[in-house]
Image (spheres, grey):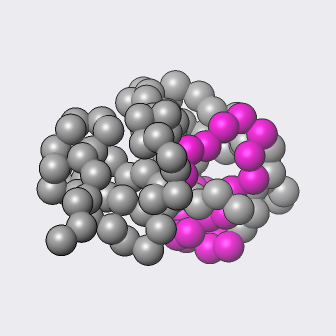
Amino acid sequence: MSKDPACPKCTAEFTYADRDLWICPSCGHEWSQNSQNAVADVFIDDSAILDANGNVLVDGDTVTVIKELKIKGSSSAVKVGTKVKNIRLTDGNDGHNIACRIDGLGAINLKSEFVRKA
């Protein structure tokens, strides 16, 4: 019987393999099976801004909108598949944590849960 590695984040022993990742169901941490030292994997801190797929976003990234977003106070909307280049991450108290400029609409704030990294 093969011994699955313990989670490097919470040390739980109930990990399982999914493709090329080890996954811990206790804390949700994922790490590569190919890494020689699982403790050396990069941890995502709690203040990191993640897209809809769980990828970490940074200033200057290009993202794609995954849901049609109606603009409050306007009859226009941001369509699905709209590419937004050179985003700027903000600390929005209302959940809008991406500031960007979209051609045809101008400056707008988006929620990271409605975009994916391109």
In front of the other: 27 or 94: 27
Residue 65 part of the magenta-drawn span: yes
Magenta span: predominant SS is loop
In the image as oriented, which residue stretches furthest toward the front?
1
Drawn side of residue 89 relative to residue 106, left or right: left
In front of the other: 36 or 64: 36
> Toward which corner of the image does residue 68 lie, by quadrant?
bottom right
Residue drawn at x 49%, y 34% is 40
Decide if residue 56 is in sight here: yes
Residue drawn at x 68%, y 73% is 81
What x and y, as percent, mark residue 84? 75, 55
Q: Is residue 43 above or below residue 77?
A: above
> Toward which corner of the image does residue 18 lie, by quadrant?
bottom left
Residue drawn at x 64%, y 57% is 117
What x and y, as percent, mark residue 48? 49, 33
Residue 117 part of the magenta-drawn span: no
Decide if residue 28 is in sight here: no
What x and y, as percent, mark residue 74? 60, 57
Drawn side of residue 41 relative to residue 23, left or right: right
In front of the other: 92 or 107: 92
Residue drawn at x 43%, y 29% is 45
In front of the other: 62 or 35: 35
Question: Magenta stretch?
Answer: 55-81
Q: Is residue 53 above or below residue 57?
A: below
Indicate the quadrant containing the C terminus: top left, top right, bottom left or bottom right. Answer: bottom right
